[in-house]
Amino acid sequence: MTKDDCIFCKIASGEIPSNSVYEDEDFKVILDISPASRGHALILPKLHYDNAYEMDEAFAAKVFPLAVKMSKAMKKALNCDGFNILQNNEEAAGQTVFHFHVHLIPRYAGDDVQIASKPHETTKEEQEEVASLIKKQL
Ligand code: 5GP
Ligand code: ZN
């Protein structure tokens, strides 16, 4: 299904033009309009899913093989020194376009891309509690 007011649905369907670098029956891969680095691209499913938790696992299983295929090609094409494959879900996690997408971000030694997090201390008890809460939901 697609969503009428969704820009990535329109780009994935071709209604809005984009710099597409790959397409198959399920996905379009486009260059990001405001790239974090040279070659920053986005994997867009042609079906609309708001985020990863809305996606069925069978469809999700097609996403990472494509990310691997793209990263291999982009690494060769762009001669980058590293590569981030990342994906944001909901506003609190930095998502700004609410159509599931995967960022493919080539990295160059000394670039100014920021994907930072600060390590926090925890305890054995807290880790056990968190692990138990997650396991109960699976
Ligand atoms: P998010 O913050 O949701 O994970 O990432 C959204 C990404 O989509 C951003 O990197 C942003 O630059 C990109 N973006 C937003 N609108 C457009 C657009 O119309 N075309 C393209 N190619 N990229 C877009
Ligand atoms: Zn959409």
Image (tube, grey):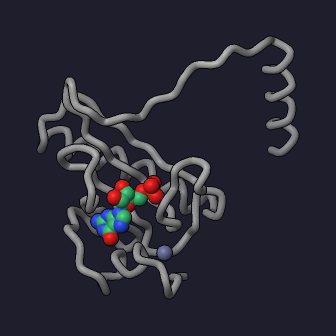
Q: Quadrant of residue 50?
A: bottom right
The answer to whether any part of residue 51 appears in the image is yes
**Quadrant occupied by the N terminus:** bottom right
Above or below — where is 107 with respect to 12? above
Which residue is depicted at the point 64% across and 18% down?
120
- The answer to whether 8 appears left or right of 75 in the picture is right
* Residue 60 locus on image (x, y percent): 54, 57
Q: Is residue 30 above or below residue 88?
A: below
Question: For this view, does 3 lie left or right of residue 7?
Answer: right
Q: Is residue 43 visible?
A: no
Q: Position of residue 117 (x, y in %)?
A: 51, 28
Tell me if residue 3 comes above or below residue 45 in the rendering.
below
Residue at the image point whose x is 13% and y is 41% from the top: 78
Residue 34, percent from left and from top: 27, 57
Question: Would residue 118 appear left or right of 16 to someone viewing this image?
Answer: right
Question: Horizontal and vertical percent for residue 10?
Answer: 38, 81
Specify the quadrant of the image occupied by residue 25.
bottom left
Horizontal arrangement in the rendering, residue 96 relative to residue 81 (left or right): right
Residue at horizontal 50%, vertical 67%? Answer: 99
16 over 26 or under it: above or below: below
Task: Check the picture and name the quadrant holding the C terminus.
Answer: top right
Rendered image quadrant of residue 111 = top left
